[in-house]
Image: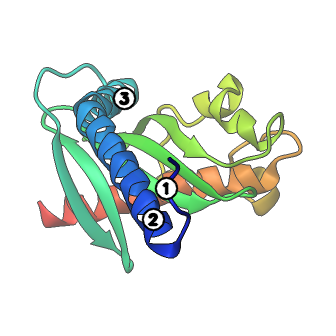
Amino acid sequence: MAAKSNLTNMALSLTLVCLVCSALLGGIYALTAAPIEQAQQAKTNSSIARVLPAFDSVPELETIEVDGASYTYYRVPGSGYAVISKVVGFGGPLTLMVGIGEDGLVCNTVVLSHSETPGLGAKCQTDASFIDQFKGWDPAARRLAVTKDGGEVDAITASTITSRAYTAAVANAYNVYLKLSENE
C-alpha cells in the first residue's frame, strides 16, 4: 500500500533527503580538505621557488599594511621576499607573486590568478618577453610604468590595461619591500 501524499510525508521525505545529502557533502569535504590544502601549499612553495633565488630556509608567512592595503608576503632569510600583490586588470582581479631580493631588485614574477581576456590580457601569464623584462628590474633607478605612460615597461600588444595592472602589482610589491626595509 502506497503512503498517502500529505504535507507531513512530503516534509519528512524532503528532510531525509537533505540530511543524506548534507552528510555526503560533509564526508566528501572531510576526505578532500587535507589533499586540497597540501596541493595549495605545494603550489605556493613552487611559486616562491620561481620568484626568488635558490634558498634552503623555510619561508615565513607574514602580513603587512601599506597605504591602507593589507599584503601577504613570505620572508625567506638570505634570499628576499615573495610578495603577493592583487590589483584589478581589464577582466577583473589579477594576483601576482613578486620576488624581491634583499638588494631591492625584482627577481621574478609569477601570475597566481587572473581574469583577463583569453588570447589578449591572459598573455600576462605566458608572454616570456613581457614577464622577463621585470627580472633584475631596479624600481629605485627605473620608472616602473608602461611606455605609453612614460615608463620603461613594454606592454603586451593590445593589452595595455592588463600591462598597467601587472606593472602596478609589481610597484605595489616594491612598496611593500620598502616598508619592510624601513622596519628592519
Q: Position of residue 18 (x, y in %)?
A: 41, 56
Which residue in the protein does label 3 denote? 43
Q: Nearer the viewer, mark 3 or mark 1?
A: 1
Q: Position of residue 126 (x, y in %)?
A: 67, 26
Say if 180 sits above or below 24 in the image.
below
Which residue in the protein does label 2 denote? 9
Indicate left or right for 94 with 150 as reference.
Answer: left
Picture residue at 37% right of the left edge, 55% below the top: 16
Q: Quadrant of the C terminus?
A: bottom left
Which residue in the protein does label 1 denote? 3
Task: Give the amino acid at mark 2.
Answer: Asn
Say if 66 sits above or below 128 in the image.
below
Task: Give the amino acid at mark 1.
Answer: Ala
- Mark 2 and mark 1 in contact (Cβ < 8 Å)? yes
Task: Give the amino acid at mark 3.
Answer: Lys
Q: Judging from the image, what secondary structure is the residue with disc 3 in?
A: helix
Q: Nearer the viewer, residue 104 or 92?
A: 92
Q: Position of residue 132 (x, y in %)?
A: 59, 28
